[in-house]
Amino acid sequence: MVVEQQKVAQVRPARVAFASFVGTAIEWYDFFLFGAAATLVFNAQFFPNLSPLAGTLAAFATFGVAFVARPLGGIVFGHFGDRLGRKRMLILSLLLMGVGTVAIGLLPTYAQIGVAAPVLLVLVRLVQGFAVGGEWGGAVLMAVEHAPPHRRAFYGSWPQAGVPAGLVLSAAAFLAVQQLPQDQLLSWGWRLPFLASAVLILVGLYIRSRLEESPEFREVAAVRAVSTFPLKDTLRRSLRAVLVGVFAQAAANIPFYVVSVFVLSYGPGQAGVSRGTLLTCLIIAALADIAAVPLVAVVADRVGRRNVLLAGAVYSAAAAFPFFWLIDSGTSGAVLLAMFLFATVGHAMTYGAMAGFLAELFDAEHRYTGVSLAYQVGGLITSGPAPFLAAALFAGLGGSWAIALYIVAACAVTVVALLLAPRTEIGR
């Protein structure tokens, strides 16, 4: 036992956090590839018999089905993560995500097998959603549970920073294949970013296999306090925390998915901004976000996670209308500034401290289940429908003001949830 404790003590939090960052970046690269492809090629390849608007809505709806599977993945992976350990579930989720992503790159299109093509696309997307449903909770807890209590927001932000890193990788991959002639892009070029995932997954598996198990889980296992039914314990003891966690994410998720998915379709059609310009500006803003997320988390460790998240929600509400004014101007400089408003500053302020905040809401015995359930149900309600609802609002009301109001409403939901959050000793 003494040897085990010494071994755990020798594990540096930075090493674990970096490994969580790399693995999360790879998983979210896989996840975001679908969003870029849904905007750029899936309507033509899998829904060719629909009108352009209907095809785009169908592609966005297919993008959203992954969010239906995410809570189930969170429950299943959370159950075994709380019973068997975080590390095993992280490796399994990464492997499952890689298989799903490569499968998308190999799918036949509607022209080849008819209606079976979009059906298979939906099924593989469900696999992706199930995998990422279990990934976030495990990656965050490995970082947070290895960290000193007064630095949990900072180390927990490293896997959070993996999300914009995954966005950068996926946007860069599609920006590269967009340089191909249109016929080659639509016939085979779009498949390359999905197939490239196989190499990234091998890198991620190697890194995660070398991690030590979370010390807090080892402590729970050592005293035989492992929960028999983590979901039951979570709902019985921490239902308020789950609900707070679900709705606290609205200000982070809705603007992020409007910017990273819907705007790639909105910009060219309404503002005359090329997709190449949008992708380039999004990549630059997301690169800045990778650094901004841990910087915001450092502040959160000093003044409280909840306080920083509240400030982020207020900021994002104030930035909603200026964001679309800048996009509608159609100039590259204005588009880049718009991306910085949300994809850098807004996202970092509303997301950087979220991991530490959610982890503190739950006891270690059912923490994997608790954070996964809150995060993934929040994604189902807020993230998944965001591109579809944004497109439907614009089509129905004919103005970007409706989407801006949608974002303001999301921020208001977050403020209410945070004000109702239980006060933790460190998160304030």
Image (cartoon, grey):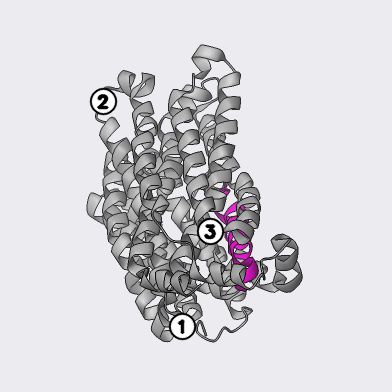
Q: Considering the numbered disc 1 on the image, is that residue within a helix, a strand or a loop?
A: loop
Can you identify the residue that label 1 sits on?
304
Report, in whole angstroms, how far the alpha carbon at label 1 lies from the one at label 3. 26 Å
How packed is label 1: few (under 14 Cα within 10 Å), some, or many (20 or more)? Answer: many
Q: Looking at numbered disc 1 in the image, what kind of residue is underneath it?
A: Gly
Q: Quadrant location of residue 320?
A: bottom left
Q: Which residues are magenta?
A: 362-389
Q: Nearer the viewer, residue 305 or 94?
A: 94
Q: Looking at numbered disc 2 in the image, what kind of residue is underneath it?
A: Leu
Task: Note whether residue 274 is visible.
Answer: no
- Look at 29% across and 64% down and name the residue there: 291
Q: Is residue 377 magenta?
A: yes
Q: Nearer the viewer, residue 188 or 92?
A: 92
Point out residue 394 in the picture as x, y percentages from the top left corner.
Answer: 52, 46
Q: Considering the numbered disc 2 on the image, is that residue within a helix, a strand or a loop?
A: loop
- Look at 45% across and 38% down and name the residue there: 98
User: Quick check: 409 left or right of 225?
Assistant: left
Q: Residue 180: which disc?
A: 2
Q: Residue 53: which disc?
A: none
- Whether label 1 touches label 3, CB < 8 Å: no
Q: Nearer the viewer, residue 371 or 251?
A: 371
Query: How many dots with numbers?
Result: 3
Point out residue 256 in the picture as x, y percentages from the top left corner.
Answer: 44, 56
- Choose the circle earlier in sequence order: 2 or 1: 2
Nearest to viewer (mark 2 / mark 1): 1
- Choose the circle earlier in sequence order: 1 or 3: 3
Q: Is residue 379 above or below residue 6?
A: above
Q: Nearer the viewer, residue 152 or 219?
A: 219
- Look at 59% across and 84% down and name the residue there: 423
Q: Residue 86: which disc?
A: 3
Q: Quadrant location of residue 172?
A: top left
